[in-house]
Each structure stands twice: as structure tokens, then as C-alpha cells.
Amino acid sequence: MLKKFSFFFLFVFLVFALAQETVATLQVEKKGGIDYIDGIDLGKKLKMQIFWQSEADILQIGTSLWAWGNEWASIKDTSFLLQSPVQNKINSKRSFWLPFPSSLPVFERMLNKPLEYDSASAKIITIMPKEFKDKDIWSVNLDEKNNGEVLELKLLKPFIVEPLYAHPNYILRLNGASIDNPAFQDLAKKSALISRVIPIQDEQSAQLTLTLKDNCEKPELVKKDSGKTLQIVLRKKQPAIPKAELAPQAVNSAGKKTKTIVIDPGHGGKDPGAIGHNGLKEKEVVLSVGLKLKKNLEEKGFTVKLTRSNDEFVELAQRPKMANDWGGDLFISLHCDAVAGKERQQKTDGFKFYILRAGGSEEDKAIARRENQAIALESDKKGKNEISPADWIRLDNQLALYAEKSALLAGYLVEAFDGGSLKKLQTGAGQAGFFVLVGAYMPAVLAELGFITSPTDGAFLATEKGQNEIAERLTKAITSFAK
Ligand SMILES: [Zn+2]
């Protein structure tokens, strides 16, 4: 009798469990009639990957991206409008606070099951998740991004993985695995970067061959979950920066008027920046130009903020954060270029304006690495001076929003400097991974105002006259852009 009885309860329990399941009990703060859920806590409870990109204040939960102050969350090729921006502080508690229930569809999409949010009990409830078949590669997912794709394979257990790249083929061998997932069949159809997918099974191993299209760069393999998740990061080759179109409607079409300009004089304090052979310090030149530019722009009626107005050290990640806090509409980081070696210093000069974008030339990347070195002076950071391919994919939210306008701004700057006292370095515009531009939610440009190591540029940059001319040309470009 007792046995029968307990079987009955087990049966009832199972039916109930199949029908409904509490996915997570949440950390909630209420403010202004909105429920805010602690995103870090939620990600952990959902057992999702959490990655806080501290330079950009972007939190990645699973495949979704969240940024402080941003009212959009993005996943795959879809953006979700939230009922309020993501907050960094609610009721004096710091975290990534996600507004609910408007954030729920993002998690629904990631977990691939319908969810409900119950405000009274602060719980997320769902029906039972779909069973997956007992196979080694149990999930194959292709995430489309603006600047590439991520092919994610979920494995039942870690396998020894051997990637091999021989253009145009990328081959992944998984020793001891089986590869019978039907999702491989139509993968190429869904992808803009893969033309063919061939899964091959032999006795010892599984082999996946991806034939890549010409517009795909060398893939990067990222292992997660102790090797149980494999991500093949496929990055699209980026087109060259377009020339500025002078049609004013192109500037105005993106909505918000340019009112607040944030000027970021590079380096400062313990970080002198580059040093010219007459002892001229980059940090001094750019501060002086920054102060002149501020004065000019204020005369034109702009609100102008400086990330530093004296000789102090400001961390790279702080600078765009300040710009966001001020509600900036345009961010310009001022720098001077430098090269080593007497002979090169004699003949290398000119200005160049950079935007944040992957796939620049080797020279552009080298300049970004030099400017990114300041991070080594920051107490808690390691010597990382480059943005990884995987980070680029994560940045696509910001890149998609502002890349075009940043390129347009760079175009106006090149035009304003053309024919001036400084020469143009190459085309005058470039692209690379400058940390100081990461996380600025506005059009952003890094200006290399000339080579401090060049005898001609160096002399010009050192003088009042030279600095005035530079400030005037910057003013002209910014005013044209803001029209
Ligand atoms: Zn610099």
C-alpha cells in the first residue's frame, strides 16, 4: 500500500515537474514601478556564461549583450527594446540591473523555451525543457553578428580538438566523438561566411570541414565550459572607410543632434605618451590643443567636456565612461603619433584619424597597440594591448550603432586637415582596436595629430601657432559634422 502510494506521489510530482519548473528565483530591486533583476545573479542561476567586458561596461550573459545606460539588449541579429535602460545602480546596489519583464524575451530566445516572470514571487517559471538526444555534439548554433558569425558546438563532454586552417578550409577534428547532428546539414545555407559543411565520421574521430567564403578571415577557436562548448569565431572582412558624404541629411538622419562634445586629451600624469627628440611630451601637446579646442567649440555654442583638464592620469576605460555619463554626442581622443629610429623619424610625418573597427592594416594595429600600452600603467590590468577576434564580435552592438557616423566624422576631419600645414599620412583615415574608443556610446574618433618624433611635425606641434591651427581645423570638422 505504502509503495503504491509513494509511486502515485512520484507520478503526480513528475507530471507537475513536466508541466512547470522554477528556472530561477531572482534578486529583485524595485524602482519607479519597474522590477530590476540582477543580471549577474540571473546569468549564474541560469548556468549561462557570464563575461564582463570591463573596458566597455558590457555584460555578456550567454549570447546576449547588455550595457549600462543602454535601453537595448542584443542577441544574434535581433535587438530588444527594454522598458528602461540597464542600470548600474539601483537602491545603492551596484550590478547590471535588467528591467523586467521586458528583458525576459532575451532569455526565452537563448533558452529556447517559453518563460514567465512572476513579479510577486520574483521567479522565472517555465515548462520543462526539450530533451536533447544522447549525442556527443548535442547542439549546433550559428549566431549572426554584424561583423561576423559564431558557430557554437555544445559537447556532452570535452574531447581533444585539433583545428587546422588551410585556406579556404577550416577543419576541426574531435578525437573520439560522434558527429551525427542533423543541424550540420543546412548550416551552410544559414551562413553568409561558410559555403560548404562536411561532417565526416570515422572509427576514431569526427571531422568537421568548413569551406569558407572569400569574405571570411582566419577563424578563431574559443573553448568554454572546460571544453564542452566550442566556438568557431568567423570574422567578416571589413570594407574600407567610406569618404565623408557632405550631404547634411546624412548627418541628421541618425536622429540626435550633436550638442555635447567630449574632448579626451590622451595620456597624462605618470603616462607622458610619446616623447619627441626635443623632449616634447605628447601629453602636454594634446592637453594644450584640447583646451584650445574646448574654447573654440564653446564659442560655437557647444557644451564641451574634457576627460582631463590638467596633468593627471586617467584610465583608458574611464574616458569613454565619463563621456557616456555626460551624455556626450561626440567623442574625440587627441594623440600624437611616434616612430622609432632616427632615419624613420626624419621622414615619417602626417596626421591620421582612426575609428574603432577590426581589420585595419598592420601599421594601424601597431599604432593602436602603442596607444593601448597605457593600460599597463593601470594597477589591476594585465599587459593586454590588443582586442581579440572574439572581443570584436562582442563589440558589434556598439560598432553597428556608431561605426557609420564615426567614419563620417573621420571623413570630415580628413577634409578639414587636407591642405593644411600638416601632411596627410596615407589616406588620412584608418581603423583599429583602440581601447579608449571602446564603450563610447556615440560617434568616436581617435586623432593622431602628427608625429611628435618628426622634426617638422614636432616643431609645428610645439608652437602656439601650430596648436591654434590644429584646434581650428578640428573645430571646423566638428562643426560641419554637427550641422
Ligand atoms: Zn597617444
Image (cartoon, helix red, strand yellow):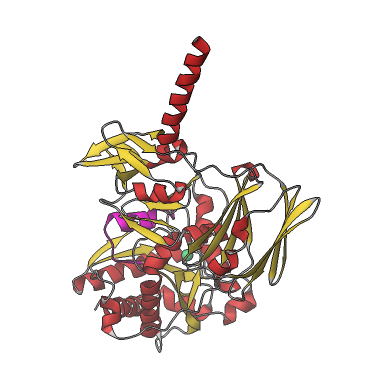
**What span is in magenta?**
315-331
Furthest residue toward top = 1
Residue name at image x 71 percent, y 46 percent: 159
188 up-or-down from 308: above or below: below
Residue 78 is covered by the magenta coloring: no
Q: Which of 399 and 309 is in front in this view?
A: 399
Residue 38 coordinates in the image, percent (x, y): 36, 39
Q: Nearer the viewer, residue 198 or 230?
A: 198
Residue 465 coordinates in the image, percent (x, y): 35, 79
Residue 381 coordinates in the image, percent (x, y): 52, 47
Residue 302 falls in which quadrant of the image? bottom left
Residue name at image x 34 percent, y 56 percent: 80
Residue name at image x 19 percent, y 73 percent: 299
Viewport quadrant of the C terminus:
bottom left
Q: Is residue 442 visible?
A: yes
> Is 82 on the left or on the right of 198, as rendered?
left
> Is 350 on the left or on the right of 24, as rendered?
right
> Is 353 on the left or on the right of 162, as rendered?
left
Residue name at image x 58 percent, y 73 percent: 363
27 up-or-down from 383: above or below: above
Residue 320 is covered by the magenta coloring: yes
201 up-or-down from 192: above or below: above
